[in-house]
Amino acid sequence: LHPVLETGCQALDVELPTLRGAHDRSENWIRDAKDYFAEQLADVEDDTLDIVFLGSIGRREASPESDLDFLVIAHQLIRESASTVPRVMTAVDAFRNDLGLREPGGTGVFGRLVAAADLVERIGLDEDTNAHHTRRVLLLLESVSAFHPRMHDELLGAIINRYLADYATPKDGVPRFLLNDVLRYWRTMTVDYQAKKWGSADPKWGLRYLKLIISRKLMVAGTVASLLKCEAAAEAYFLDEFSMPPLARLAQLHSHLSTERCQDLAAVLRIAEEFATALQDEAFRDEAQSVTKRADIEVGSRFDYFRSQAKLMQTHLESIFFDDFLADRARTYLSF
Amino acid sequence: VTPVETEERAFERELRTRIMQEIESLGLSAEDVAQRTGMLPSGVDALFQRRSWPLPVAFRVARGLDLEIRPSLDRR
């Protein structure tokens, strides 16, 4: 586990065997990827391109069923791009095949080349499309470089500084611009979830729904924790925070919370572990995928159980954010 | 899940089960399978934990191990 999450688990007396395995699997795949691309793409011009993994590998929560969500990021103009870019894409595809992973879904958000300058400069207004916004926020929240980590850190630093540019640095307290963009991402995701099931049955509704109300909510909650506890907003603070997986960001609150709220935090981590374990059980995934609308949910089923656990997790998160040291800031920044 | 997806997944599971039986009967480890298929050991390790494999992966493993895919399974 990430050292911060490890410390949190020890303090809270929580065991996370499945998430520990997922962390090890993710780290192994990242290490394999770095070796693979260093060898296969050794002649790619320095400081031009990076390959970044997002999604479950970026969160260090990869399961055997994970997709390989990736972006190739152009940090400057690429000479001979007509041959270089396809070769990089092919190398990523070959790596995915060598891991035996399925092809990623066809949303168009991942699996493509994007320009680093766009990720830094295009924040807000029409040019900041849904896909572009998703890429930028997920780069901050759950990403890891598999090719040139130094370039990745520089990119994250530039994006963070773009959010902080209008403040005196370090800014006291919470950087509202960055917080609003993260909250916008969460709200957009919840609205798009509704859009995807509107009009016709969504064959993946069940799994999508549970992931939204458990995994994705936890990712955002962990990030909101980093933002609300911020005392001096600066690049170094957020680079450090975003280098942790989202669950570690949440778990770090243990050293500030009362004993009672620590119990809420422990309960949240146990639900995350329980859900991660269920996601690795193909029988459960089949059950979840057979649920295509609310009417399909059988009372007493595992799906129904995890829906209840998600509601329980929500009440624990509310207690953590609104009934302890973050309460004033949560009221200020999470309302209007 | 559509009937076509269900059927495809069932076929993938059947194929995976047959190949895993062969791997077990040959006493091969994930490392052995990785070596013979050119896949990464960390990937094969994860494959062993899945109940179904994508068809290209299943055929790659079968080819790498010189396993005969029986006609009853070779429906595609």
Image: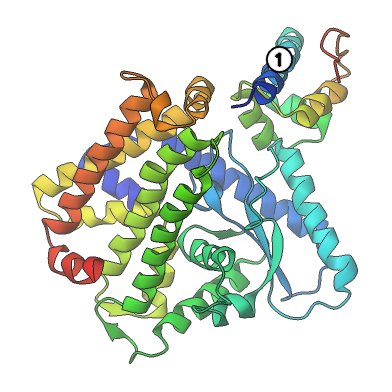
The quarter of the picture where residue A255 lies is bottom left
Residue A323 rendering spot, x and y as whole percentages: 11, 55
Q: How many marks?
A: 1
Residue A257 rendering spot, x and y as whole percentages: 14, 55
Q: Quadrant of the N terminus of chain A?
A: top left
Residue for point 71% across, 76% down: A47
Residue A113 rendering spot, x and y as whole percentages: 72, 66
Which is more toward the observer, A290 or A320?
A: A290
Crowd rating for badge 1 (residues with CA inside 10 Å; few <14, some 14–19, many 20+): some
Residue A245 in sight from this viewpoint? no
Residue for point 44% across, 70% down: A239
Which is more toward the observer, A323 or A181?
A: A181
Residue for point 28% across, 61% down: A225
Local SS, label 1? helix
Q: Which residue is mark 1?
A: B20
Residue A130 rendering spot, x and y as whole percentages: 54, 65
* Residue A1 horizontal side relative to residue A24, left or right: left
Residue for point 89% across, 18% down: B66
Residue A104 in sight from this viewpoint? yes
| Chain on which label 1 sits | B
Indicate the colouring scheme.
rainbow
The quarter of the picture where residue A78 lies is bottom right
Which is more toward the observer, A212 or A251?
A: A212
The quarter of the picture where residue A29 lies is top right
* Residue A2 horizontal side relative to residue A30, left or right: left
Up/down of A273 relative to A164, above or below? above
| Residue type pointed to by label 1 | Met
